[in-house]
């Protein structure tokens, strides 16, 4: 390409380098999913260093495919390669990201999320033209399990340890015995984490997606929590009032078409001096302050998942996954909550406490 007065070739080359890195990363999300689903990362982490022949034997897979997969992983810097031994291995940091589901930085679930976005791209592209939404009940199945596993990492390491203690007086209630509603609970990851931590309390999980509620009920049964944890299909505006001491929304209020209506209903379901906890994706209030790697991920997810979900529902406010504290607080105030504060935060989440 010939240089022109309007093109800075150095900037162009830098931008093409960025694009090459981005396209390579995007192509490898499918391989992350493959490695996660087939247990390739976990086997390499447990038994490595290994050749492609050894990894294929350990995982019951075909060597020729494994060899190509390992080569792509090494080119990505996701695993290491020793040319002297022709063996592949994983450093402890790589293990934490790809092979240890209990790690605070586990990212193995991103493959399911990226697959869901690509599978549903035609529906979302059509929605761009029609202005209609794409509801959760009309999404690729891998979105639901991917969402549950992706958020599990943060919830496992922050919910009981930091977020609940940051709320005024809530832990004392939970220890004595409280009623808790988890609205938009999905597969029940957050509900069950709280139930295990506070055996004197009762927990109720609600979600509009019937398949997710079935998965949550099965998880509660496996973990022996069915007596204290109940799940039901219900929306944020229809779940039953029960004098809840705590009502939680985990990364879902922005997905709702009518978050003001949802929180108005919450206010009616709370016990006296009850608390509403809003856990939302981390965002500053101004677009220019969110132009960073976290904002990049969340704006993409919001475009493909969150905003279409909201626009598929009544009102269709379309808060988006980067709503920020000011807009979220405004929604809470319009719903009748008068005391709203930021209780905690992580690089990925804002935690707001709302009280009447």
Image (tube, rainbow, N blue to C red):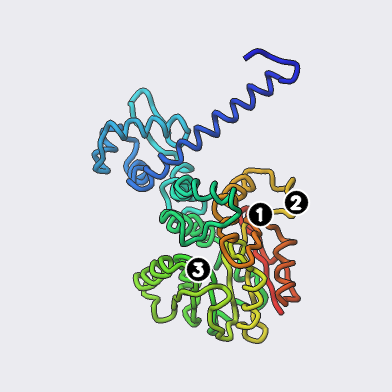
Q: Check disc 3: other Cα within 10 Å, few if <14, some if 14-19, many if 20+.
A: many
As drawn, the residue found furthest toward the front would be 130
Instruction: Report if the CB atoms under discs 1 and 2 are less than 8 Å apart.
Output: no
Q: Which residue has dot 3 on it?
A: 185
Q: Which residue has dot 1 on it?
A: 322
Residue 352: image quadrant is bottom right
* Residue 57: percent from left, percent from top: 24, 39
* Residue 247 shows up from this direction: yes
- The residue lying toward the viewer, choosing from 147 and 118, is 118
Can you say whether 107 is above or below 316 in the image?
Answer: above
Q: Earlier in the sequence, mark 1 or mark 2?
A: 2
Q: Which residue has dot 2 on it?
A: 286
* Distance in Å between CA atoms under marks 2 and 3: 29 Å
Q: For the point 26% across and 33% down, which residue is it?
A: 63
As drawn, the residue found furthest toward the top would be 2
Q: Check disc 2: other Cα within 10 Å, few if <14, some if 14-19, many if 20+.
A: few
* Residue 49: percent from left, percent from top: 34, 35
């Amino acid at each position: 390409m010939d240089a022109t007065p309007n093109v800075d070739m150095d900037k162009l080359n830098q931008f093409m380098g960025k694009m090459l890195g981005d396209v390579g990363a995007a192509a490898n999300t499918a391989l992350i999913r493959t490695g996660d689903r087939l247990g390739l990362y976990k086997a390499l982490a447990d038994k490595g260093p290994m050749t492609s022949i050894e990894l294929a034997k350990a995982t019951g897979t075909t060597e020729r495919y494994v060899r190509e997969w390992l080569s792509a992983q090494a080119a990505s810097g996701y695993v290491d390669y020793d040319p002297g031994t022709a063996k592949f291995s994983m450093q402890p940091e790589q293990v934490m990201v790809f092979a240890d589901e209990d790690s605070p930085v586990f990212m193995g679930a991103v493959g399911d999320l990226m697959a869901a976005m690509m599978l549903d791209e035609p529906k979302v592209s059509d929605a761009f033209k029609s202005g209609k939404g794409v509801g959760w009940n009309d999404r690729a199945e891998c979105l639901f399990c991917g969402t549950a596993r992706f958020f599990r990492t943060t919830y496992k390491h922050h919910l009981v340890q930091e977020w609940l203690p940051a709320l005024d007086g809530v832990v004392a209630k939970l220890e004595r015995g409280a009623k808790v509603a988890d609205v938009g609970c999905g597969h029940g990851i957050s509900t069950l984490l709280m139930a295990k931590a506070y055996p004197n309390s009762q927990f109720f999980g609600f979600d509009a997606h019937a398949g997710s509620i079935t998965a949550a009920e099965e998880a509660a049964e496996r973990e022996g929590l069915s007596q204290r944890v109940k799940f039901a299909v219900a929306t944020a505006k229809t779940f039953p009032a029960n004098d809840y001491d705590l009502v939680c929304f985990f990364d879902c209020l922005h997905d709702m078409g009518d978050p003001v209506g949802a929180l108005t209903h919450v206010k009616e379901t709370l016990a006296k001096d009850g608390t509403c906890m809003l856990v939302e994706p981390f965002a500053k209030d101004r677009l220019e302050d969110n132009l960073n790697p976290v904002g990049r991920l969340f704006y993409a997810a919001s475009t493909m998942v969150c905003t279409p979900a909201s626009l598929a529902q009544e009102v269709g406010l379309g808060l988006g996954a980067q709503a920020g504290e000011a807009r979220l607080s405004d929604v809470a105030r319009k719903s009748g909550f008068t005391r709203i504060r930021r209780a905690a935060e992580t690089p990925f989440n804002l935690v707001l406490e709302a009280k009447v």
